[in-house]
Image (cartoon, rainbow, N blue to C red):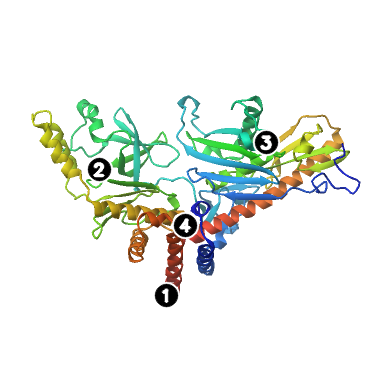
Amino acid sequence: MEFVNPEGLRLDGRRATEMRQFRAEIGVVSRADGSAVFEMGNTKVIAAVYGPREVQNKSQQINDKAVVRCEYSMANFSTGDRMRKPKGDRRSTEISLVIRQTMEACILTNLMPRSQIDIFVQVLQADGGTRSACINAATLALADAGIPMRDLVTSCSAGYLNSTALLDLNYVEDSAGGPDVTVGFLPKLDKVTLLQMDAKLPQDTFKNVMELAIEGCKAVANYIRDILMENTKRLECRRGV
Amino acid sequence: MRGEVEIPLNKTQKLRLERALEKLESISSKANLSDASVTVADEISVNYEDGVLQGHGTSEMNGRLVATVCGVVERVNRLVYVRALRSRYKPETGDIIVGRVIEVAPKRWKVEINFSQDAVLMLSSMNLPDGIQRRRTAVDELNMRSIFEENDVVCAEVRGFQHDGSLHLQARSQKYGKLDKGQLLKIPPYLVKKRKQHFHHLNDYGVDLILGCNGFIWIGEHVAAVDDMVVDQIIKSEQPDSKAGDSVNSDEQEQSYTSLDIRQNICRMANAVRVLSSLGFMVTMEAIVEIVKLSNSKKFDIHDMLGAEFYVVVAEEEATRRSSSSKKR
């Protein structure tokens, strides 16, 4: 199958290094401490953060830092064919773990001893790159909840199809079976906190693909920063003196 | 801000709301409020020669000061800190808070106060109902549920952090204690400003208002300053003795009856707080009373106060109020 046509356009009309359109909204769940919706093209994810709050299961309590928990789920209506999977399937357990580790790396957990932070992410529409979208939504929700963080983690995926590196794969490209590199990145610290790939790729090509994904992460970071800044300014000016 | 998504506005209301909010924004941008806003990992410009004290919400990265939360940079002499908006409550000693009892443990109550851990109210750090100063005995410990039970709403003062990092409360005054006959509202704590007075008795409405620093707001029927705990205790101790328990009960019911207009006042106030917090405006006693008066003068029903129209009216009112107060300056 041809994923990049001779003019250099992809199936959905993007260039190889073009991202899908983002949209983010903060404060969508009124009961949560922080919440956000993040969209990348047709992928739509909602995240809610509760905490820092009292540890529910006392045996998990850590005396000098906070416990971070994460739950990833996909809404039944999120994919093309309506699926009825049990909640704790392998895929979602794995993604929960990935998101938890990525977020834990940037939260300053030592400032909130003996507490727990719960992150709930749910995929509302799945069109490839749900992992990345979940991490971006979780970052926004954590920032909204006022939880101290080293840096904003942002994430983006990149792939390699028809011997071209492609940024931000959608579902069709994702399921083509080529390599899919998901990167989690701390833009200010210039560090990678997550790197996943489930295929083989020559080393020099991998370097290009990863750099492309990092560029994507930086673009997401700029957008997220703008959204947060706007939100902070609005809250402050509404509050008044 | 949170309400915007939920409340369906029609076209004119949307326009009016936008105009009012724009006005508010222009006022605050004149006052240079929004310049100091930062988001996570933004650099804070400081003069390093003077020496800097890193406060909350900041950390050092590669020799530079960066923010770790979204908020507003505040500077007090050499101290630089970021005041986070929309975060959980950070207790400070002496704060007046409203909380909910979630557990009765040996010699202590666990109270939920919107902090990262539950606060502890020791039996020894509160006045006994009989008002006598004495050592707490095992009998007192057994009778703890007669003072506070699970799910009771209580008002107390932050005593401070213990060595082990737990937060302790105290209630050593008549004004603290159990709250009943009213409504508890939870709003983001950044909307409550610390002031001298957090207890308000609104005579015109017959209502008590407690603005807890932790964002829990209590609106209840006014209780006179007499120690009603003593009265409770007497009734309870009498009950087993008196054979005519029914008559006592009916007396109690009569006492606990709240008149309709006070109930309506409580609801009106509660809705005023809801509107203010969903718009993200500062919640003070004056603001609440103003909104209540506004709703009365414009003849809004209590249930209409949560509707789109009143929402817009409040935003407009706030815009005109702030613009007039900024002109005075």
Residue A57 left/right relative to A149: left
**Looking at the picture, how far across and down is residue A143, in whole percent?**
57, 46
Q: Are marks 1 and 3 on the same chain?
A: no
Say which residue label 1 marks. B328
Q: Chain of mark 4?
A: B
Visible residue check, residue B273: yes
Q: Which residue shows up at 53% across the image and 40% down it?
A: A49
Say which residue label 4 marks. B279
First of labels 2, 4 by sequence position:
2
Q: Are marks 3 and 4 on the same chain?
A: no
Say which residue label 3 marks. A79
Visible residue check, residue B193: no
Q: Secondary structure at mark 4?
A: helix
C-alpha separation, residue under disc 3 versus residue under disc 4: 36 Å
**Looking at the picture, how far across and down is residue B163, in whole percent?**
40, 35
Which residue lies most toward the right here? A6
Say which residue label 2 marks. B172
First of labels 4, 1 by sequence position:
4
**Looking at the picture, how far across and down is residue A182, in whole percent?**
73, 37
Q: Quadrant of residue B142?
A: top left
Category of crowding for the residue at label 4, using alpha-carbon neighbours closer than 10 angstroms: few (below 14), some (14–19), many (at least 20): many
Q: Chain of mark 2?
A: B
